[in-house]
Image (cartoon, grey):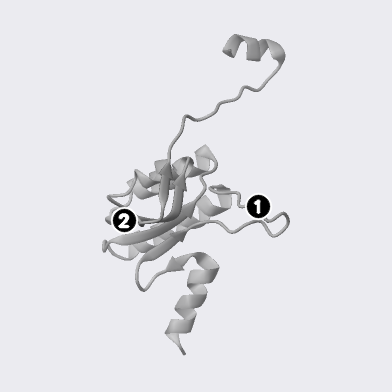
Amino acid sequence: MNTNNENAKDIHDYNLDIINRHIFLNNSPSIVDDINPGVEHKMANTFIKNIRILDNLNNDPIIIHMHSIGGNWNDGMAIFDAISTCKSRVCIIVYGQAESMSSIILQAADCRIMMPNAYFMCHFGSSGYAGNHLDVQQCA
């Protein structure tokens, strides 16, 4: 049994390197339309499972490798909370970009490292209203 090949398969399949305590926080483009959705529920659910696995094994530091365009507020805050409540020390290394929601996720880490060619972008969020026209008028 070759544990190096198994570990490489886990990294590619689950974005988790249990042996070295690394998590890869990124999202692949959709197979259907080749668009990178950024932070979304599947990414958040996988990440939360991964960080809990590592945090429950022991309290050694966890390294997160992040490259993200941003994404959904609620899913990003779920990731932020998972990092914030981690007993282990967490370091996030940013490759490429930490934009929008990802710039907020980055703030949850105990240690933040931007690679030389990465950039950080934070902006005002957007909001929306839903309901019938009378409900919306009262919110505006």
Q: Is residue 48 visible?
A: no
Task: Please tell me which residue is depicted at 61% across the width and 52% down the height of the picture.
Answer: 36
Q: Quadrant of residue 92?
A: bottom left
Q: Residue at x 52, y 70 (%)?
A: 12
Decide which of tag 2 and tag 1 comes sooner along the chain: 1
Q: x, y (%) of residue 7? A: 45, 77
The amino acid type of the residue labelled 1 equals: Ile
- Secondary structure of residue under mark 2: strand
Q: Residues within 10 Å of mark 1 (few under 14, many from 20)?
A: few
Q: CA distance from mark 2 to mark 1?
A: 28 Å
* SS at badge 1: loop
Please provide percent x and percent y for residue 82: 40, 48
Please report contact status of discs 2 and 1: CB closer than 8 Å, yes or no.
no
Residue at image mark 1: 35
Q: Which dot, 2 or 1, sits closer to the camera?
A: 1
Q: Nearer the viewer, residue 128 or 54?
A: 128
Figure quadrant of residue 121? top left
Q: Dot 2 corresponds to which residue?
A: 91
In the image, what residue occupies the spot 65% across and 13% down?
135
